[in-house]
Amino acid sequence: MNPPATPLPLAPTRCPLCGDANRCAVAQGQTPRTCWCMSAQVPPALLEQLPREAVGRSCICATCIAAWNQRGVIRRFAR
Ligand SMILES: [Zn+2]
């Protein structure tokens, strides 16, 4: 029983959860030091929601982390 594959825009500049721009400094050609994610705590439970192919490739966006921390919800692609 495999769920139907969802076409995700797996670009390094896109959040793999919601598809919004993740504003990752690395993806924009800047040093990781300047990225917002260096000071953000990404909840492990949220990381577990990522598609396996997105791990280590696309950053979650700050909005998704905030939504998870505040409401315990995972933002998905709005269709
Ligand atoms: Zn997101």
Image: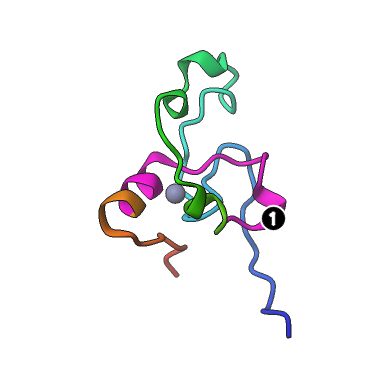
Q: In the figure, is residue 48 to the left or right of 7?
A: left
Quadrant into which the C terminus falls? bottom left
Residue 49 image-quadrant placement: bottom right
Relative image position of residue 33 (x, y in whole percent) = 51, 14
Q: Magenta span has 64?
A: yes
- Which residue appears farthest toward the front when viewing the image? 44
Left or right of 2 on screen, residue 61 = left
Image-quadrant location for residue 14: top right
Q: Relative to the observer, which residue lies in front, 12 or 79?
A: 12
Residue in the foreground of this view, choosing between 37 and 10: 37
For the residue marked with disc 1, what is the amino acid? Answer: Arg
The span picked out in magenta is 50-67
Q: Nearer the viewer, residue 78 or 34?
A: 34
Q: Secondary structure at mark 1?
A: helix
Image position of 58 with respect to 36: above or below = below
> Can you identify the residue that label 1 sits on?
52
